[in-house]
């Protein structure tokens, strides 16, 4: 006879604050015993499996302060933490990344997940295989974290610190993400390798490149996800691209540069995985050439 198990969360206190200040007040009172509920696409399975057992659940999903997008004082686009993936995919909120964030949002899970999952929730979950930690690192974005002590900005390039670990203090809440615009004429490439559509990435590469009018790369930001516990920057590829045209860098050269960096260190991936990451980066860079031809 087949066995079964009851999947339900442990008892907790449910709080639905009416303001951000009220939410951070609850966090300040309960600290690590409290968990934030936004879209719930990551947290609810953890609750049901009792891998997360908070005493207090703070529901911020209806806070209007955390929805929508606006221009910040520094010229960046400030996205509320509770902006859902489908709003980015559908262009409901502005995109000054020349289409990169819309393309990234469209590749997250399935439509039902994108209708509920949030930008802030994905960053707070800090999964090394997820899209937003890598994309926001490549764009030079900043996470805005607030507590009862005030608000601070944390670079997305330093935000994820390990497996499901980030720079947030236990009393802090992500309230927004500041994304600077890409430079005029910038090109980007994005490629995700996964077993099937909707799955987390086995490898995820993104490149944001500033190209001069003569086609020469002036600067490049190339990042890799799902290779380590944190987004991995690829300075070898960036340096090899700078001062050359995107087409000057051969596929085999890219694959070798990436594989070499991935294999460095005691926690390097297998030979197959290192090669996979190299191919993923090469396919992302191939999109730069296609944009230039267009």
Image (spheres, grey):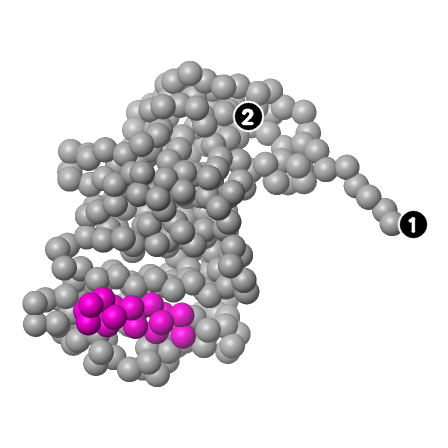
Residue behind mark 1: 1
- Name the foreground residue: 38 vs 174: 38
Q: Quadrant of residue 4?
A: top right
Residue behind mark 2: 57
SS under mark 2: strand
- Farthest-out residue, right: 1
Q: Position of residue 213 (x, y in %)?
A: 7, 67
Q: Is residue 113 above or below residue 280?
A: above
Q: Which residue is drawn at 17% across and 75% down?
A: 245
Q: Residue at x 26, y 61 (%)?
A: 188
Q: Position of residue 11 (x, y in %)?
A: 67, 25
- Name the foreground residue: 282 vs 271: 282
Q: Does the magenta stretch include residue 201?
A: no
- Name the foreground residue: 82 vs 50: 82
Q: Is residue 288 above or below residue 92?
A: below
Q: Could one spot residue 165 in this view of the protein?
A: no
Label 2, residues with CA under 10 Å away: few <14, some 14-19, many ≥20 = some
Q: Which residue is drawn at 34% across and 74% down?
A: 282
Give the magenta part as a residue range.
279-294
SS under mark 1: loop
Q: Quadrant of residue 8?
A: top right
């Amino acid at each position: 006879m087949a066995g079964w198990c009851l999947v339900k969360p442990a008892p907790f206190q449910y709080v639905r604050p009416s303001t951000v200040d009220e939410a951070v007040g609850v966090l300040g009172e309960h600290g690590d015993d409290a968990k934030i509920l936004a879209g719930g696409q990551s947290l609810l399975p953890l609750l049901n499996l009792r891998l997360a057992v908070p005493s207090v659940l703070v529901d911020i999903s209806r806070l209007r302060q955390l929805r929508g997008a606006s221009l910040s004082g520094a010229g960046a686009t400030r996205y509320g933490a509770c902006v859902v993936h489908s709003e980015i995919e559908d262009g409901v909120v502005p995109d000054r990344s020349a289409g990169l964030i819309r393309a990234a949002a469209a590749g997250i899970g399935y439509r039902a997940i994108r209708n509920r999952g949030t930008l802030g929730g994905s960053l707070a979950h800090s999964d090394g295989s997820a899209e937003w930690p890598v994309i926001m690192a490549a764009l030079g974005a900043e996470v805005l974290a607030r507590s009862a002590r005030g608000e601070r900005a944390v670079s997305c390039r330093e935000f994820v610190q390990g497996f499901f670990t980030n720079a947030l203090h236990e009393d802090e809440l992500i309230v927004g993400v500041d994304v600077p615009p890409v430079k005029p004429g910038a090109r980007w490439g994005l490629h995700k390798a996964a077993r099937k559509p909707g799955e987390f990435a086995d490898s995820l590469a993104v490149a944001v490149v500033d190209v001069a009018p003569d086609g020469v790369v002036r600067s490049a930001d190339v990042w890799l996800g799902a290779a380590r516990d944190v987004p991995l920057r690829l300075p070898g590829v960036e340096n090899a691209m700078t001062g050359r045209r995107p087409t000057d860098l051969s596929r085999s050269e890219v694959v070798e540069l990436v594989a070499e960096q991935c294999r460095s260190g005691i926690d390097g991936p297998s030979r197959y995985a290192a090669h996979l990451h190299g191919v993923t980066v090469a396919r992302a860079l191939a999109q730069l050439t296609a944009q230039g031809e267009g």
